[in-house]
Amino acid sequence: MHERMLDKQNEPSFEDMLAFCGESAALWQALDQWISDTFQTDRLVRFPYGNDYGWGAKYSRKKKHICDVFAERGAFAALFQMSAKAINTIYDQLGTHARQVWEEKSPCASGGWIEFRVTDAQQLEDLKKIIGAKVCTR
């Protein structure tokens, strides 16, 4: 796991988390804008899943969890559950990195938990495809 914001006692603002991401902040801002515009989401800064995950932003739509995005040094990582049914609708459109992330998922029910680290624009575009399939295949 990469360096994250792990000080549970000091809640960062969303802007603090973006700054922590360094050059990847613009990518997270693009995701934040896209997910908000596309799905009319709510964003909540929180410290979920225990001490190893750190501070992140929960994105939800009508109280349905879409994903958590965690600030990392030089990147950000989205964590979410994905069904095989949903990923199969877009799998052939994904790049090598995204396919590898899916193949290395933590199995759960008919799919699994994905932790998708984003460091470049192509990865961001694949993440948007995956999230779109997740939300639209419920």
Image (cartoon, rainbow, N blue to C red):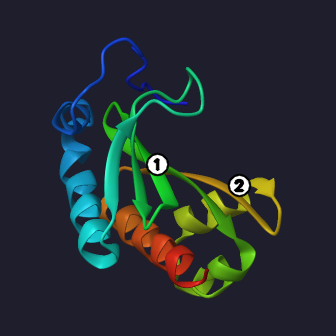
Give the total number of marks visible in the rendering. Answer: 2
- The residue labelled by disc 1 is 68
Instruction: Point out the image quarter for the C terminus.
Output: bottom right
Query: Which mark sits nearer the N-terminus, 2 or 1?
Result: 1
Q: Where is residue 70 shown, x and y percent of the image?
A: 41, 40
Q: Are marks 2 and 1 in contact (CB under 8 Å)?
A: no
Q: Is residue 94 above or below residue 49?
A: below
Amino acid type at circle 2 is Lys
CA neighbours of label 1 inside 10 A, class few (<14), some (14 to 19), many (20+) = many
Q: Nearer the viewer, mark 2 or mark 1?
A: 1
| Dot 2: element | loop
Instruction: Point out the image quarter for the N terminus.
Output: top right
Asked if residue 64 lies left or right of residue 81, the reply is: left
Q: Quadrant of residue 61?
A: bottom left
The front one of 75 and 14 is 14
Q: Where is residue 101 shown, x and y percent of the image?
A: 62, 58
The front one of 16 and 45 is 45
Q: Residue at x 48, y 70 (%)?
A: 131
Residue projecting furthest to the front: 62
Distance from label 2 to label 1 (Cα)? 16 Å
Amino acid type at circle 1 is Asp
CA neighbours of label 2 inside 10 A, class few (<14), some (14 to 19), many (20+) = some
Q: Quadrant of residue 45?
A: top left
Q: Residue at x 83, y 62 (%)?
A: 109
| Dot 1: element | strand
Mark linked to residue 109: none
Q: Where is residue 51 shown, x and y percent of the image?
A: 55, 20
Q: Quadrant of residue 108?
A: bottom right
- The residue labelled by disc 2 is 105
Q: Where is residue 13 shown, x and y percent of the image?
A: 21, 32
Asked if residue 132 lies left or right of residue 76, the reply is: right
